[in-house]
Image: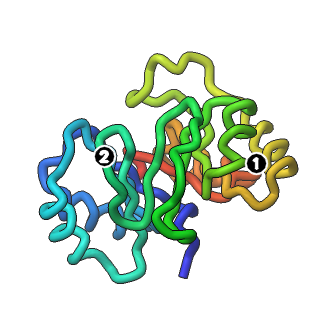
């Protein structure tokens, strides 16, 4: 089984059919699904949706709308702030980071971090200048056991190869999986 952080599919803010989105993401190679919708989803609907997923496919909710833990984990937006105790030791806590300082803070509590943006991305045009790929190798040496998941504009296989060669443990994206 591939590691959850290798290819993390993120929902676009609006999804007409979550089941269809998940099916496409899985077909494209997703090793985890991250639900980051602009609106929340009821616990019942989320549970029904999750029942149709492959048994060992992790799904993570984004803390921008999830008010309680669901699925295999929660992902938190930047800046890093420890969210408190996990419901179980294996429950995943992810953190979005945009610089070395945020990674340093998140490394104390996160199960993995998203670091980026590495390429221009329409989902966050306000980010401005992209990070240089070299930061991945530097951070990997500093935090050898923390999965560093590259994010930001990774929408084609060539970019996936670049970020993996630079030191990322995996990648997360929206457009790559559409």
Residue at point 30%, 46% (across, down): 67
129 relative to 44 in the view: left or right: right
Closer to viewer: mark 1 or mark 2: 2
Question: Whole-percent x and y of residue 38?
Answer: 24, 36
Residue 166: give its label: 1
The answer to whether 168 is drawn above or below residue 125 in the figure is below
Judging depth in this view, the residue of 170 and 76 nearest the camera is: 76
Residue 67: give its label: 2
Mark closer to the chain start, 1 or 2: 2
Judging depth in this view, the residue of 145 and 110 nearest the camera is: 110
Cα–Cα gap, marks 1 and 2: 35 Å
163 relative to 65 in the view: left or right: right
Residue 130: give its label: none
The answer to whether 153 is drawn above or below residue 57 in the figure is above
| Residue sitting farthest toward the front | 85
For numbered disc 1, what is the local secondary structure?
A: helix
Choose top left, top right, bottom left or bottom right for residue 65.
Answer: top left
Q: Residues within 10 Å of mark 1 (few under 14, many from 20)?
A: some
Choose top left, top right, bottom left or bottom right for residue 33.
Answer: bottom left
For numbered disc 2, what is the local secondary structure?
A: loop
Residue at point 54%, 71% (across, down): 90
Residue at point 55%, 16% (across, down): 128
Judging depth in this view, the residue of 19 and 43 nearest the camera is: 43
137 relative to 68 in the view: left or right: right
Q: Residues within 10 Å of mark 2 (few under 14, many from 20)?
A: few
Q: Please identify the quadrant where the N terminus is shown.
A: bottom right
């Amino acid at each position: 089984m591939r590691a959850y952080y290798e290819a993390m599919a993120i929902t676009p803010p609006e999804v007409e059919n979550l089941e269809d989105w998940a099916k496409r993401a899985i077909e494209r190679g997703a090793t985890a699904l991250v639900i980051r919708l602009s609106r929340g989803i009821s616990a019942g609907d989320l549970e029904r949706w999750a029942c149709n997923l492959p048994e060992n496919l992790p799904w993570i909710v984004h803390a921008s709308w999830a008010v309680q833990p669901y699925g295999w984990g929660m992902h938190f937006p930047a800046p890093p702030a420890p969210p408190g105790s996990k419901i179980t030791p294996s429950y995943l806590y992810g953190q979005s980071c945009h610089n070395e300082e945020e990674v340093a803070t998140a490394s104390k509590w996160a199960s993995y971090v998203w670091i980026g943006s590495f390429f221009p991305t329409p989902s966050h045009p306000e980010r401005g200048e992209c990070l240089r790929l070299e930061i991945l190798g530097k951070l990997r040496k500093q935090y050898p056991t923390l999965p560093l998941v590259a994010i930001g504009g990774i929408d084609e296989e060539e970019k996936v190869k670049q970020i993996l060669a630079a030191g990322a443990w995996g990648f997360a994206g929206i457009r790559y999986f559409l």
